[in-house]
Amino acid sequence: MTGSMVEDVLEAAHIVPYATSGDNDTSNGLLLRSDIDTLFDLGLLNIRIDYQINLHDAPLTSEYNNLQSIAIKLPRDPLDLPCKARLSQRMLRQ
């Protein structure tokens, strides 16, 4: 998403939390930089079903505002694409 090549700061994030879904499938996951993962967990950043970033509240007036509406980098394998239904489900919960 951010283009970071520093593997040590990258984290796997569930779109729908594992605690509620029990789903570890790659289509329920995103690879995020640790600070972006925190924003995602707090509901301050979401991924729309068109795979573009949607920021909420404080991040819009911060150094993260340049991420608003940019398209995330997608996996090469179509089977690993983030599930649009799960992305939509997450947006509805917040």
Image (cartoon, rainbow, N blue to C red):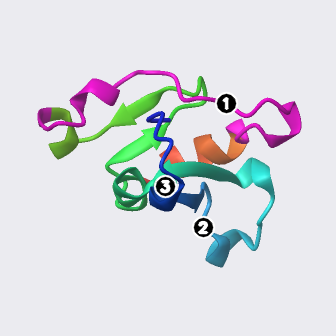
Nearest-to-viewer mark from 2 and 3 = 2
Residue drawn at 44 percent across, 58 percent down: 9
- In x, y percent, where is residue 74? 67, 30
Tags 2 and 1 touching, CB below 8 Å = no
Segment tinted magenta in the rendering: 61-84
Height in image: 92 above or below 38? above
- In x, y percent, where is residue 8? 49, 61
Q: Dot 3 corresponds to which residue?
A: 93
Question: Is residue 55 covered in magenta?
Answer: no
Q: Is tag 2's residue or tag 3's residue first in the polypeptide sequence?
A: 2
Q: Spatial distance from mark 2 to mark 3, Cα to Cα?
A: 11 Å
Q: Is tag 3's residue or tag 1's residue first in the polypeptide sequence?
A: 1
Q: Dot 1 corresponds to which residue?
A: 74
Q: Is residue 17 left or right of residue 54?
A: right
Q: Is residue 26 left or right of residue 4?
A: right
| Residue 57 visible within the image | no
- In x, y percent, where is residue 35? 34, 55
Residue drawn at 73 percent across, 41 percent down: 83
